[in-house]
Amino acid sequence: MSTPHNPPGPNPRQSKGFLVTVALPMTVLASRLQRHDVFVLPEQGDQPLAVADVTQHPHLEARLVIELKGSSIPITLHVNEPVQPVSIPRRVDVKCQLCGNTTTTDIDLVAHGEPKTWICNRH
């Protein structure tokens, strides 16, 4: 069910080193959503939803309450429900595979893929 869509685009140019990424699947589980993410429900692909906040449902353990930007009414999704990501900005710590040096970088997982390997500019 999770098949990769278009390959990730080039990573933002980093003077700190070389980042290798893997394409994000066409759908991700709702449990991966965080504040500032943008997604669409598969059945409503033309209506992007921007996440204002994600919390655990107070009574249903397998459900998330997702507050949306521009809406006063939150939605509830099962943690395993697939959603199509539009933008998933993350700040990630990456460790050089050769020397262990660590850096933090901003990346959009949809546009650039998920970080897998980093080589710092000392190599």
Image: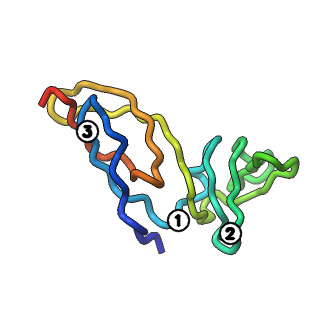
Q: Earlier in the sequence, mark 3 or mark 1?
A: 1
Q: Quadrant of the C terminus?
A: top left
Q: How many marks?
A: 3
Alpha carbon distance from label 1 to label 2: 15 Å
Alpha carbon distance from label 3 to label 1: 25 Å
**Which element type, helix, strand or loop, lies under badge 3?**
strand
The image shows residue 3 at horizontal and vertical percentages of 42, 71
In the rendered view, tell whether residue 111 sits above or below residue 102: below
**Which element type, helix, strand or loop, lies under badge 2?**
loop
**Which element type, helix, strand or loop, lies under badge 1?**
loop
Which residue shows up at 23% across the image and 32% down it?
96
In the rendered view, tell whether residue 2 sits above or below residue 39: below
Reading the image, the residue beneath label 3 is 118
Reading the image, the residue beneath label 1 is 27
Which residue shows up at 27% across the image and 30% down it?
15
Query: How many residues crowd around disc 1 within 10 Å: few (fewer than 14), some, or many (20 or more)?
Result: many
Q: Earlier in the sequence, mark 1 or mark 2?
A: 1
The image shows residue 97 at horizontal and vertical percentages of 19, 36
Residue 46's mark?
2
Pair 1/2: label in front: 2
Left or right for 31, reference 13:
right
Task: Specify the amino acid type for callout 2.
Answer: Asp
Left or right for 100, reference 87:
left
Query: How many residues crowd around disc 3 within 10 Å: few (fewer than 14), some, or many (20 or more)?
Result: many
The image shows residue 40 at horizontal and vertical percentages of 65, 63
Task: Specify the amino acid type for callout 3.
Answer: Trp
Task: Please tell me in which quadrant of the rendered image residue 93 appears.
Answer: top left
